[in-house]
Image: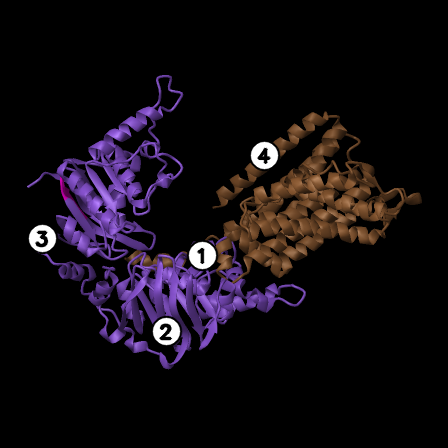
Amino acid sequence: MKETLLVMEGIDKSFPGVHALDHCKFELRAGEVHALVGENGAGKSTLMKILTGVYARDEGKVIYKGKEINLAGTKEAQELGICIVHQELNLMPHLTAAQNMFIGREFMGKNKLFVNDNEANKKAQELFDAMNLRLDPKVKVGKLTVAMQQMVEIAKALSFDSSILVMDEPTTALTESEIDELFKMINHLKEKGVGIVYISHRMDEIKRITDRITVMRDGTYVDTVNTKEVDIQQVINMMVGRTIYETANEHNYTDPNEVVLEVKNLIRGKTIKDVSFKLHKGEILGFSGLMGAGRTEVMRAIFGADKLDSGEIYVKGQKVQILRPEHAVKYGIGYLSEDRKRYGLTLGETVEQNISLASVDKYTNKLGFTNMSTITKTSEEYIETLSIKTPGPKQRVKNLSGGNQQKVVIAKWLLRDCDILIFDEPTKGIDVGAKSEIYKLLSQLAKEGKSIIMISSELPEVLRMSNRIIVMCEGRITGELDIGAASQEEIIKYATKREA
Amino acid sequence: MANVAKSAGTAGIGTKKSMFNAANAQKFLAFGALLILLLFFSMASPFFLTFDNIVSIMLSTCVNGILALGIIFVIITGGIDLSIGTVMTFSSVMAGVMITNMGMPIWIGILVAIGTGAFCGFISGTVVSRLKLQPFIATLGVMMITKGLSLVLSGTKPIYFSDTPSFRKITTGSILTFGADGKFSVPNGIFIFLGMAILAGIILNKTKLGRYNFAIGSNEEATRLSGVNVVKWKTAIYSLCGAFAGVAGIVMAARLDSAQPALGQGYELDAIASVVIGGTSMVGGEGTILGTVIGAFIISTLTNGLKVMGVAQEWQIVITGCVLVLAVLLDTMRKRGSK
C-alpha cells in the first residue's frame, strides 16, 4: 500500500440557499489516479475548490502529508504542492509558454529590475524534458493546440513541485490521439509519486486510467471503490441513486397532431452535427446530455443568436428564415438562457424594464413615444400571476433572488406572446423551494398550450418534467426516449455514446 | 436545508431603501457642488454675481452643453464618441458653405448642418455597431476625417456670415429682454440649450430609443437576445449624437458669426467631462439629462469664476482637471458604499 497523501474528512460547505457539501470525505494516495465522479452539481468542483484553497470550508479537516492544513488561498495551495488544471484553461495566449508557467513569480536579474526570460525558458525546458514533452518554451501559448496548452498547464503545476494534481475534465477538448498522449503523461506522473484527482464524466476513460473511484451525489459522499472491482453500470447506479421523483406522465398536455416547431438537418461547424427534431403543441421536450454536448448551441442557432451553416426550420408548418433573434421572436420563439445574468437580463434595470424589453413595440405609438405607465400596470399583473417576489415593478432586477430573476425572464417572453419557449437550464442557480415553483410554472404553461423545450443537465429534473427526452452527445442526437421508457441509466448511456 | 426556504423569502427585499438614497445622492451631489461653487465665487469676487456675468456663464455653457446632451446617449450605451467636437466644426463649415458661399437661405443652412452631424454620427454608428469596431477607434477616425474635411471645404480659412446679419441672432439675439430700455437681455443660445435639454430628456425617458438605449448599455447581448435589433438602434443613437453636434455647430457659428474650421478638437473632452461630472458612468447603462446639464454648468462656472477671480488661464485648466477627478472619485465612492 502506498502512503496516504491527503485525507479530507467531514467537509461541509454552504452557499446562500444551497448546502453544497454535506460532510464529505476524500482520500488520496501518492502515485494514485483517483476519479471523482457524480452528476453536475454533485459537489465535485466545490470539494476540489476547498482542497485548492479557492473556498474556505465551513467544517471538517484537511490533512495533507500528515499535517492539518488551513489554506487561505490558491497561492498557498500551490506553494504546498496542490495544483489544479482547470477545465477552461487559465493561460494568457499572448505570453510564451515559459512566461505563462512562471507568471507571478518571474525570475529577476541580479539588479531586481528586469525580468530574466532566459532563466524562465531554461527552467521550463528542464521541466518539459523531464515530462518527455517536445515543446519550445518560447512559443506563444495562443499558437498551441488545446492539448499542448493543457500540457503547459500541467508543466506549470509541476513547476510548483506538486504532489497533488487535480484535473477537471481534462479530455473534453481533446482528440482521441491527444487523449492517449495525456494518459501517457498521467502514467508518467504516477510513477513519480504524484497523486492525481481525475474529474470526468467519461466512464470509459475512468475505467482505463484510474485506480480508485469516489462517487458523490447531491453534495454527499456515496462510496469509494477500486476501479478494477466495479463495472461502469455499478458506478452509474451509485451516481444516480435511488431517489424517486414524480414523473411527467401526470401532466402530459401534448397534442401529437400539431407540430409547432420542426428543424431539419441543422449543421453548424463542429458544434451542431445534423440535428433534426419536432416539437408538439403543449409538449415539454427535454434535452439531456453532458456539458458541451451541443444542446445550447442548437437552441441558440434556432433562436438566431448564432448563424447556422445549413438546415431548415419550420414554425407551425411554415418554413421560416431566422437570421437574428428578432426574427425568432417574431415567430413566437422565446429563449431563456442558462446564464440569465449575461444573456437574459439587463441586471441594473428594473423589473418592469426587463419584463417589457421584448415588447416595447406594443407600448409605443407611431411617434416613438413609449407609454411607461401602461408598462408598469402590465408588469404588476405579471408580478402577481407569476408571484415574483419583489417590492414592486420599479425594483432593480439585480436585487432579486435567482428564482425570481428567472420568473422575470419568463414574464418577458409571456408578455411577448411567445408560444415556443426554450428553457436552457431553467433551475440553474435556483434554490430548492423556487425550483418546484418553476416546475409548476412549466406545467402550467404546457397546459395553456405553450410548447416547451427544456435543456437540463439534472437527470431527475429531465425525468420529472419532460414528456419526451432527446439526448445529445458531441453535437448530434444520440437518442430519443419516450418518458415511459426513460430512466437515468438509459439517458447516461446515450449521453456518453461517443462517435467511434 | 432549513435555511433554504428562509433565504428564498427574504432575498428580494431589503435593498430598496439604500437604492433610493443612492439615487437622491447622485442628484444632490452634482447640484450641491454647483451651489457651493456659485456661493464660493460670489463671496470671492464682487464681479461674479452680476447679471452680465451669469448670462456669460450660461452662454458659454451652450455649446459644450449641447454636445454633452448628445454624447450622453452614446455614453449610456457604454460607448464613446470622440468625433463630436470636429463634427460640430464640420457642420458649421457646411452651414457656412451653404449660406455664405452658395447664398442659400439660413434655414437650409441649419438643416444641412444638423443633417451633416447626423450623417457623421450615422457613419460612426454603422462602423461601431455593424462592423463591430471599437467606438474609441471608429470615432477617432471620424474625428480626423471631419477635421480634415472642414479644412478642405473652407480652404483653411474661416467663413464669415457677413452677408446674413440675422444668422448671428440665432445665438446672440434675444427674445427675452426686460428692465428699462432692454437693459437685461437673455441671449437665445441659452434657450436653445434648455430646449435641447428638454428634447433630450423626452427622448431618453419617453421613447423607445431611450428605452433601448439604457437596455443596450446595461446588457447589450441580453437586449439582442430579447429580439431587439441592436445594430439598428445603436446606429440611431450615434446619429442622434451627431445631430446634437450639428445643432452645437449652428450655435457656435452664430455666436462667433463665422465658421472656424480649425476649432473643435478638444470640445469632445469637455462634453465627456460634463457628462461624467453629472454622475453618468462611462460603463454605460445609466445617466441623467439633469445631471449632464448641471455638469456642463459646473465646468463653465468653474472656468468663469476662476477667470473673474483673476486666476491665470493655465491654472484654470489645472483646477478644472482636479475637479473632474474629484467629482468622479466621489461618485464611485458613493456607488461602492451603496452596494
Q: Which residue is mark 3?
A: A228
- Chain represented in purple: A
Q: Which mark is residue A278?
A: 2
Residue placed furthest toward the top: A111
Labels 1 and 3 share a subunit:
yes
Is B5 situated left or right of A176 in this image?
A: right
Answer whether residue B189 is magenta in the image.
no
The chain letter under disc 2 is: A
Residue A140: x and y in percent read: 37, 36
| Element marked by disc 4 | helix
Q: Nearer the viewer, mark 4 or mark 3?
A: 3
Residue type indicated by callout 1: Tyr
Give the camera-side residue of B159 and A241. Answer: B159
The chain letter under disc 4 is: B
Q: Which residue is mark 1?
A: A343
Is A421 situated left or right of A224 in this image?
A: right
Is B213 situated left or right of A252 in this image?
A: right
Residue type indicated by callout 4: Val
**Which residue corresponds to the image point at 49% horizontal and 68% vertical from the top-left?**
A321
Residue A138: x and y in percent read: 34, 32
Colour seen for chain B: brown
| Element marked by disc 1 | helix
Residue B16: x and y in percent read: 50, 54
Q: Which residue is mark 4?
A: B325
The image shows residue A338, relative to residue B304, as above or below, that is below
The image shows residue B198, relative to residue A409, as above or below, that is above
Is A468 situated left or right of A204 in this image?
A: right
What crowding class fits label 4: few (fewer than 14 Cα within 10 Å), some (14-19), or many (20 or more)?
A: some
Q: Are marks 4 and 2 in contact (CB under 8 Å)?
A: no
Q: Quadrant of residue B48?
A: top right
Mark 3 or mark 2, which is nearer the start of the sequence?
Answer: 3
